[in-house]
Image: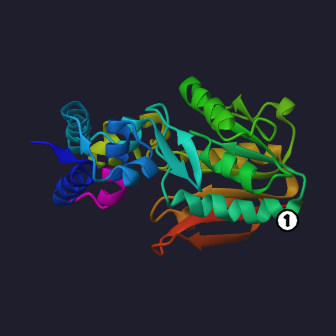
Amino acid sequence: MAITYNDLYLNIRQILRGHGVDAATLEARELVCFGTGKTREELVRDSRLYASPKLEAQVRELLRRRLAGEPVAYLIGEWEFYGMPLDISREVLIPRADTEVLAEQAIVYVRNQGACRVLDLCAGSGCVGLAVAAQAPESRVVLGECADGALKICRQNIRRNGLSGRAVPIQADALQKPDRTLGEFQCIVSNPPYIPTGDIPGLDISVRDYEPRMALDGGADGLDFYRSISALWKEALLPGGRLYFEVGIGQADSVLRIMRSQGFGDIQVIEDHRGIPRVVFGTLLTEL
């Protein structure tokens, strides 16, 4: 039986809601758009037209995969972050709304610095660093990432958002000392792996079985990268510069203590939109 695009969208949304998907409205729209090859505007325009059986079958196959646990961002190969469209693959974490708080805090600081250098360490898709580059046009952003697959996505997203003159990807391992040829930065921002190793088997299937483990695993207590970056990468930060971290639930106090022990002061904790401490940042003091 033929179905209109609007009814197909409503049916997909209803099924997703029935399976407890919080973002059912957004996900249904993205699945129908991708499965039928329509933009969001075209979907609205053609809402009363009938979808062909072939297109309906494509959408329902995407829905089947989604209900089996595969995230929508990986199904459609893109996601939006801070108003920017980003290419996404299984080589990188899917950008979360919570991480926009990290980007927002860094953008405010970087804008006030004028022309400055920013390092996004553990960049993944490049979402945070590219948001800074887009919103603080005087800055120059380096996207530091160790995985080749993620660096490829960074390069694609730089081109996609027209930021070739403001951002550059480089291979960098956050657990190793920075190469001196990198120079110094006024700001380092990082959303590092922070899930304790033992907690990974208990994660939702959409995260555990699809997102890259190396971007999740923060060591036995989830804090390995905070220790390493605070201790080693402060060498790449100018005195008086800022280090910004995203942190997991319940980690803010531990990260604050790590930063303080490494010579950072004026440390602040910022909550996300759900009231959860999500960002910890501090200033590198000129003397310990």
Q: Name the image quarter holding residue 51.
A: top left
Q: As rendered, which of 244 and 103 lies closer to the eye?
A: 103
Q: As rendered, which of 147 and 113 lies closer to the eye?
A: 113
Expressed as whole percent of the image width and height from the top left, the position of residue 86 reads: 55, 42
Expressed as whole percent of the image width and height from the top left, the position of residue 11 reads: 19, 54
In the rendered view, tell whether residue 267 sits above or below residue 179.
below
Q: Does the magenta run of residues contain 209? A: no
Q: Secondary structure at mark 1?
A: helix
Colouring of the image: rainbow
Question: Residue at (87%, 37%) from the top-left corner?
Answer: 183
Expressed as whole percent of the image width and height from the top left, the position of residue 229 reads: 67, 46
The residue where tag 1 is placed is 112
Question: Residue at (63%, 50%) from the top-left corner?
Answer: 128
Expressed as whole percent of the image width and height from the top left, the position of residue 279 reads: 59, 64
In the rendered view, tell whether residue 93 sits above or below residue 249.
above
Question: Residue at (27%, 43%) from the top-left corner?
Answer: 205
Which residues fall within the magenta stretch? 20-28
Q: As rendered, which of 106 and 159 lies closer to the eye?
A: 159
Q: As rendered, which of 271 and 288 lies closer to the eye?
A: 271
- Amino acid carrying label 1: it is Asn
Local packing at callout 1 (Cα closer than 10 Å; few below 14, some 14-19, many 20+) is: few
